[in-house]
Amino acid sequence: MNTVVSINNVPVRFIRKREMLHLTGLSSSSAYHLMSIGLLPKSIKISEKSVAWLLSDILEWQAKRLAENGVSATEAANDQEELIDPKTEPKKAIAARKQRIPKTDHRRPAQKHATANDSTKESSHD
């Protein structure tokens, strides 16, 4: 029996916390705060110790945030650069990051240390 649960002919997909945070761009504490005040969809208990979110709820939340800022979902999708998943394409991700981040020298400048000769010159007064 292969029954796929769907809402409005869209298959239901549960996503876990990591993916929800990735899709929303929120920190964990911000996400839970927004859920507590009703500004982010609440999680659904999927087992005794596990929760998940409906992907459709998170996508709807994204669309609302874009609309509130006067951006259509199509415009947002067209404006984004090609995303590279570091898990599946690590070499490409590293190369892309190197292109975006200018190289800088973070080493501390060399400091001149006082020597015994320097201290004797300063302390000797005629």
Image: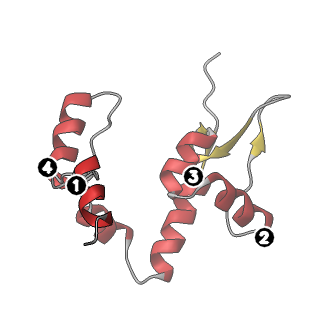
Q: Residue at x 63, y 47 (%)?
A: 54
Left or right relative to 114: residue 59: right
Q: Earlier in the sequence, mark 2 or mark 3?
A: 2
The image shows residue 59 at horizontal and vertical percentages of 52, 57
Pointer 3 with pointer 4, Cβ within 8 A: no
Q: Residues within 10 Å of mark 3 (few under 14, many from 20)?
A: some
Q: Which residue is mark 1?
A: 109
Q: Which residue is mark 3?
A: 56
Furthest residue toward right? 48
Q: Amino acid at mark 1?
A: Pro
Q: Earlier in the sequence, mark 2 or mark 1?
A: 2
Residue 76 visible in the snapshot: yes
Q: CA distance from mark 3 to mark 1?
A: 53 Å
Q: Which residue is mark 2?
A: 37
Q: Residues within 10 Å of mark 4 (few under 14, many from 20)?
A: few
Pointer 2 with pointer 1, Cβ within 8 A: no
Q: CA distance from mark 2 to mark 1?
A: 50 Å
Relative depth, front residue between 76 and 8? 76
The image shows residue 9 at horizontal and vertical percentages of 54, 46
The image shows residue 71 at horizontal and vertical percentages of 38, 78
Q: Earlier in the sequence, mark 3 or mark 1?
A: 3
In the depicted structure, whether residue 98 falls above or below residue 58 = above
Q: Choose mark 2 or mark 1, whichever is in front.
A: 1
Secondary structure of the residue carrying tag 1 is loop
Secondary structure of the residue carrying tag 4 is helix
Q: Amino acid at mark 4?
A: Gln
Q: Earlier in the sequence, mark 2 or mark 4?
A: 2
On-image quarter of the C terminus: bottom left
Pointer 2 with pointer 4, Cβ within 8 A: no
Q: CA distance from mark 3 to mark 4?
A: 34 Å
Q: Amino acid at mark 3?
A: Ser
Q: Residues within 10 Å of mark 1 (few under 14, many from 20)?
A: few
